[in-house]
Amino acid sequence: MVNAVAQRSARRSVTIVAVAVVLGLLAFAADAVDGMAGQLMIVVVSSGLAWGSAALLAGRSAPDRRRAMTGATVLLVCATLVYYLLILVVSRRWSGGTLVDGSSGDWHGLRSLAIMTTAWLLVSVVAGPSLGLLGHLTRTARLPSAALAAGAACGALSGQGWLTVTAAPPWLIWTYDGPDAALVRGFIAAKLIEVVVPLALLAWLATAHRLWRAWPLMLSATALTATLSALAWRFLHTAANQLG
């Protein structure tokens, strides 16, 4: 019995690390894709929605709260390390720049890379336990708590999309007909996906765990956390621009 439990735990750990490696690789690959396809690929494999959903599902499948929180955190941390390690070693896009005085900009590039890696590791350490716990609660908690957890998780995952949609309403810029029209429409489509997919995930969780009876709680939690998440993403974007 003990061996069986240990084997399941080991398989789960290997699965989490494998998913993290795949996420990091796909996110790295998405950076090299241009145009509308690149915008859509970033949403699917290299966004807060994509990585956050993976952390949420890792927590949902965990046997207890502790492993839900640690598993989701390990997934995000490992994916972040893989992604930035590939930038450091493979693409080396931090190198080759030149400063105004003509000297090499490599040190500045490395510094920026180190800052961004540290920042996203901190985000992973904060978001991982939260998403892992929420995912676990959607499956194991009583109805009111499970509905609140599902709503909070999906609202948090939609925040990045809501930030862009409210700042640049799609219905106002869809008619743009300039030379970059395809890229603009790809960007709009990508951001709409970041809003629609979390709502679809919420509907799936509500159906799978029979949470519809508490739909007012669920939707209230979704609205509140979506707002807070959008504000958090705005802060992160501002901080990243200043640090970069």
Image (cartoon, helix red, strand yellow):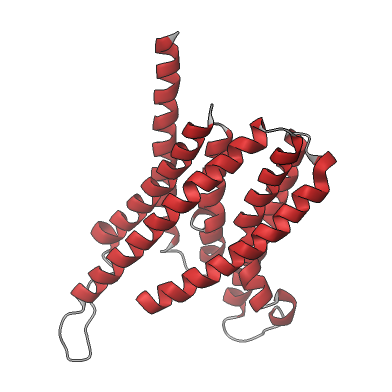
Q: Residue at x 54, y 66 (%)?
A: 232
69 sits left or right of 210 in the view: left
Residue pushed farthest top? Answer: 1
Compared with 191, 217 (above or below) is above
- Residue 193 visible in the shown view: no
Q: Residue at x 77, y 53 (%)?
A: 219
Instruction: Give how far across and how far down residue 77 sits, in percent.
Output: 38, 48
Instruction: Give how far across and how far down residue 115 sits, in percent.
Output: 31, 66
Compared with 127, 195 (above or below) is below
Of the pair 67 and 202, the residue shown nearer to us: 67
- Residue 226 visible in the shown view: yes
139 sits left or right of 203 in the view: left
Quarter residue 103 falls in: bottom left
Compared with 184, 70 (above or below) is above
Q: Residue at x 22, y 91 (%)?
A: 100
Of the pair 88 and 113, the residue shown nearer to us: 113
Residue pushed farthest left? Answer: 103
Quarter residue 186 falls in: bottom right
